[in-house]
Image (spheres, helix red, strand yellow):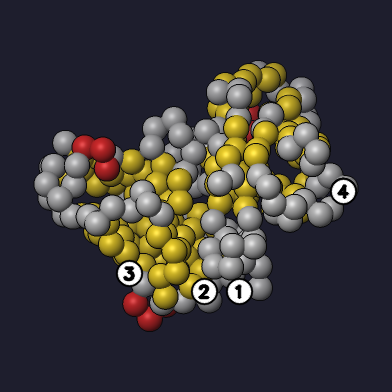
Amino acid sequence: AQTVTQSQPEMSVQEAETVTLSCTYDTSESNYYLFWYKQPPSRQMILVIRQEAYKQQNATENRFSVNFQKAAKSFSLKISDSQLGDTAMYFCAFMNPNTGTASKLTFGTGTRLQVTL
Amino acid sequence: DTGVSQDPRHKITKRGQNVTFRCDPISEHNRLYWYRQTLGQGPEFLTYFQNEAQLEKSRLLSDRFSAERPKGSFSTLEIQRTEQGDSAMYLCASSPPSLPIRQYFGPGTRLLVL
């Protein structure tokens, strides 16, 4: 079974600064997907960024980028130029597309990010 | 596109009562997922539908839980004889046939069992 570990329960960053959220995972699969989801207070979860394991290039989406280290099974999220609207719970998630049926997500326990003035 | 919607958004019930939640996926999304999120935890997979067929159920889904997706459109999740341990946020997600790995989440139904 796959597991996802987020070792930082809470983090804080000042507006306009850069912050990195950590995630490690465990799997015996070679092909899989990794995701970062954002869950703002009392709002629904939205996808921030996605990484395919077979791609060596790290994914980027505007101010969000990842550092994917496949051998180390590490998948960190870097948020540049942090904004107040980035305040949220951030979940790292794993998906094995090879199960034949469900492409279910396995989530970590989340990191609560607070962006301050 | 309207997003995934869930109803009700909040539900308070007494232990032993039955509750039913509804999820309306994004139009033409053929895959639908239910997750449960307890306080301080990430969502955990409960069950999955492809069209009207329920293809996978987690061991978390005890006999008191049942889910349906008649006609492959909306889905319902029913919990019978609720227990205090059922208190959680129940999340629904859907994904399109063109990109099944891309799950869109609804706002969730927060259940409190007294």
Q: Which quadrant is the C terminus of chain A positioned in? A: top right
- The answer as to whether the residues below labels 3 and 4 share one chain is no
Q: Which of the chains bears the disc numbered 4?
A: A
Number of the label disc, if any, that sits on residue B30 = 2
**Measured along the vertical axis of the image, is residue B70 above or below residue B25?**
below
Q: Which of the chains bears the disc numbered 2?
A: B
Tell me which amino acid carries mark 4.
Answer: Gln
Which SS class for mark 2?
A: loop
Answer yes or no: do the residues labelled 1 and 2 have beta carbons within 8 Å?
yes
Q: Give the Cα distance between marks 1 and 3.
A: 20 Å
Q: Nearer the viewer, residue A23 or B10?
A: A23
Number of the label disc, if any, that sits on residue B68 = 3
Number of the label disc, if any, that sits on residue A56 = 4
Tell me which amino acid carries mark 2.
Answer: Asn
Q: Give the Cα distance between marks 4 and 1.
A: 26 Å
Query: Mark 3 Cα within 10 Å, few/some/many (few <14, many 20+)?
Result: some
**Measured along the vertical axis of the image, is residue A24 above or below residue B108?**
above
The tag earlier along the polypeptide, 3 or 2, is 2
